[in-house]
Amino acid sequence: MYKRRYHKKRIMFAGVFSFVFAATFAFLSTANQDKTEAASTANFKAGNIISDAVMTDYNSMTVDQIHAFLKSKNSCNQSADPAAIGATRYENVNTTKHGITYNRRYFFRNSSGGENSGLYHVKDGHFVCMADETINGHSAAYVIWDAAQAFKINPKVLIVLLEKEQSLVTDKWPYEVQYRAATGYGCPDSAACDSKYYGLEAQVGNAAYLFGKIVYENKHNYYPVGKNYVKYHYDNSCGGSVVNIENRATGALYTYTPYQPNAASLAAGYGLASGGCGAYGNRNFFLLYSDWFGDPHSGTTYNMNTISEKLPALSSLSSSKQYQLSPSNNAKSAIDISGGVSSSSKSGTLITYQKRNNSIFNQSFVFKYDDSEKYYYIENPMSGLRFDVSGASSNDGAEVLLWTKHIGCNQKWTLKETGGKYVIISSCSNKALTAENGKLVIRKYTGANNQLWDANEVPANAVSFGNGDKYQILNVANSKLSIDLSGGVHPWKNNYEAIMYEARSSNNANQVFSFQYDETNDAFRILNPATGLSLDVTASKSDDGTRVLLWQGHSHCNQKWKITKDANGVYNIKSLCNSKPLSALKTNPNSMDSLVIFNRTDNSAKWQIKKV
């Protein structure tokens, strides 16, 4: 539901406080709220109201568990008899608003002697409370769960938000206005609520979306980690103080409700403070969460004061270089792809192999930084696959695999640095990449050595080519010569003679090649992308001077080549069939010389391979 209907263009930014519902200053003022047992404010910490781990624990409750919890807080058995509730009932209204059918209008006497009117949902002589409400064919429990899943926010957080804004969890007869602004989204202090965000679905979905953007992506966060001035009240004369905000989840609560409780508000528990400067939204959020679900600080993932964020300007990591990653508890091992990798791979299992080695294809990774998102993607260049948290899970022990590219949070990582080591943090959960029993998983960061990683630059003589990348192959004896297709590319041809010809521009289709790795033979196919044809030793012969053609792909050894590279970046390319080098028969740029295999060691059998 939310995944279809709530996406990028979701947040209203009329001003810094555009997310705040005016009732957050008052003590849960809905008339019919049940009294809540008071938790202590002794553990309230303005800079750490809730941890990132708790905020993002989106699998904490199922739909059935949410419904059972709502019923446990509210039996939903209030009679709609006017005499029983001290109200006057007027005509049936039978109107549907925001997905809910309201069929009674009641007038309640207020403290000034006047009457307040509201539309209510009545069924079988009883008011329908939120636990039993149906919104556009879905239960309220489903609406909460669906938003939690769509934006990876703890449903407990959304339940508490509904209570602290409109008492919808405990109210025995909620009326239309409460659902209309259920979470206070789009309801600034200084103006009326924006009608485009009316209704339980829109309110819960947009609140979850905002929290998710802040916690996972650090976007739209008006109270980032660090020192921020936070007011005690919207009235500037009430003052405020500098708060050291320790995590994004707490920043999200202040972005939503930008006030902290003053000393009087904290001393009052759930009650009202004297002096007229009380703001209770974040205090009540803390108390309600503590009372209903336990400590909102549990599961804190990392200490921002001791781990600094690593961003791409650092010279220590380069997006143009390849790295092996070794856990600090076993520096001789490295992350490896189980079973090897090929350019046709669609997924793979990541393991911590017991030996770092120079057969680098399975152990080579690049860090690609997305400047707009402020995250890294960690990619194997041979397969083009990325580190991926299975199912975008936030659970401790969720496995990390290689997977095809996408833009979900399960492929986004933040790098942190501590003591010269890297901590690699999943953006889905703020949990750390962990080496465990030979596999890679995510776990709450504890500082253990199996969560600290060394990034070792791949040796200069290691051979590795990017999946889908294109290259020009130049002869060392005469760098003005490039491997070329005789006669140029023609769509009706299915074979060509490979020749040496004057090097043209890097985008010349005749002279562009890519490399496909064969894990079984530790060899490469060299193919021309424009034709799909591969370099092929004629009839698998081994005679010196045997011509090399471009031919339709097959699995024989005459289309497979062993490639090595020396410290100077010069390549040797030898046929898998007979170990004879690929050579330029001659190196005269004025003639179309043949490409052959020839048992020689001079520069005519050596190559420069340049990415184009």
Image (tube, rainbow, N blue to C red):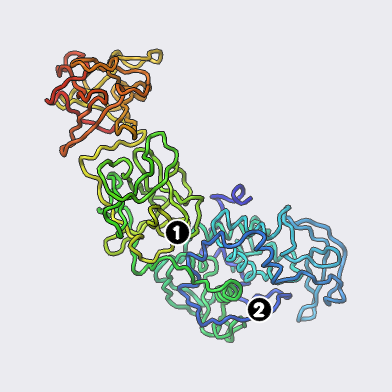
> Where residue 418 sits: x, y (%)?
30, 64
Residue 573 seen anywhere in this rendered image of the structure: yes
Comparing marks 1 and 2, which lies closer to the viewer? 2
Between discs 1 and 2, the one toward the N terminus? 2
Q: Quadrant of residue 190?
A: bottom right
The residue closer to the viewer here, 127 or 531, is 531
Residue 438 in the image: state x and y as whole percent: 38, 53
Residue pointed to by mark 1: 218
- How much space separates mark 1 and mark 2, taking CA atoms? 34 Å
Please tell me in which quadrant of the rendered image residue 39 appears: bottom right
Q: Alpha-carbon neighbours of circle 2 within 10 Å: few (<14), some, or many (≥20)?
A: few
SS assignment at label 1: loop
**Kind of residue at disc 1:** Asn
Q: Residue furthest left?
A: 602
> Is disc 1 surrounded by few (<14), some (14 to 19) or many (20+) residues within 10 Å?
many
Q: Residue at x 29, y 21 (%)?
A: 558
Tell me the quarter of the image containing the C terminus.
top left
Q: Can residue 234 be seen here? A: no
Residue at 52% x, 67% y is 253
* Residue that carries the numbered disc 2 in the rendered image: 36
